[in-house]
Image: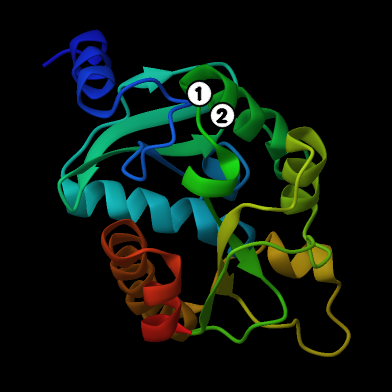
Amino acid sequence: MGWRPLLTMVARLWGHPNSERDEAMKLIVGLGNPGRKYAGTRHNAGARCVLHLARVLGTEWRRRYPLALVAPATIADRPALLARNRTFMNESGRAVAFLVERYGVNPQRDLLVVHDDLDLPLGTIRLRGQGSSGGHKGVASTIALLGTQQFSRIRVGIGRPPPGVDVVEYVLSSFDPPEEAAFQGVMEQVAESIKAIVSEGLEGAMNRFN
């Protein structure tokens, strides 16, 4: 099925994007930096998690906008869009705001942003329904461009750098082999938590994964 017929089907099933129906289309955005240079870095943990989910669901990145890549998906029998920003991390809010506008998504209800977090150790994830950026520039950009802090996130722990290591250098470096092995399990955990958010709602998923 082509992209336009899929969107038409989604519109028929779920109605106008601004309707008050609970079962609206979900937009799940994994934040990172574009290009092969950054693909395996700690800062791309969010984007890698959404890439992993796309592989699990067997979907493809069919739509390539200047600001974002989009893959249609079905999660728990509900329509969803997986997305990755094509901007650099500090401007990722441009991509998220574009997608919210393009697909008529209600951020407070149907947006989920997946991003790396220095304040959580590797192997830990946290689900939250709103809040500040916590110093994450991609989340700060998203808050600024959407004009609200009220959207759901999954924080993916990457841990703090060792003493003497610059934070920017750390987040733009790759996991070492043992860390990468641990991160493979994290991506699966994030995939399961996203499925739970869509099927059970955020509160139910938080009770399971936080």
Under mark 1, the amino acid is Gly
Residue 144 image-quadrant placement = top right
Towards the viewer: 14 or 100:
14
- The mark found on residue 100 in the picture is 2
Q: Residue at x 18, y 10 (%)?
A: 5
Q: Position of residue 91 (x, y in %)?
A: 76, 36
Question: Furthest-bottom residue in view?
Answer: 163
Q: Position of residue 56 (x, y in %)?
A: 20, 54
Question: Furthest-left residue in view?
Answer: 1
Under mark 2, the amino acid is Val
Residue 35 image-quadrant placement = top right
- Tell whether 145 sits left or right of 14: right
- Category of crowding for the residue at label 2, using alpha-carbon neighbours closer than 10 angstroms: few (below 14), some (14–19), many (at least 20): some
Q: Residue at x 74, y 64 (%)?
A: 131
Quick check: marks 1 and 2 in contact, CB under 8 Å?
yes
Q: Secondary structure at mark 1?
A: loop
Rendered-image quadrant of the N terminus? top left
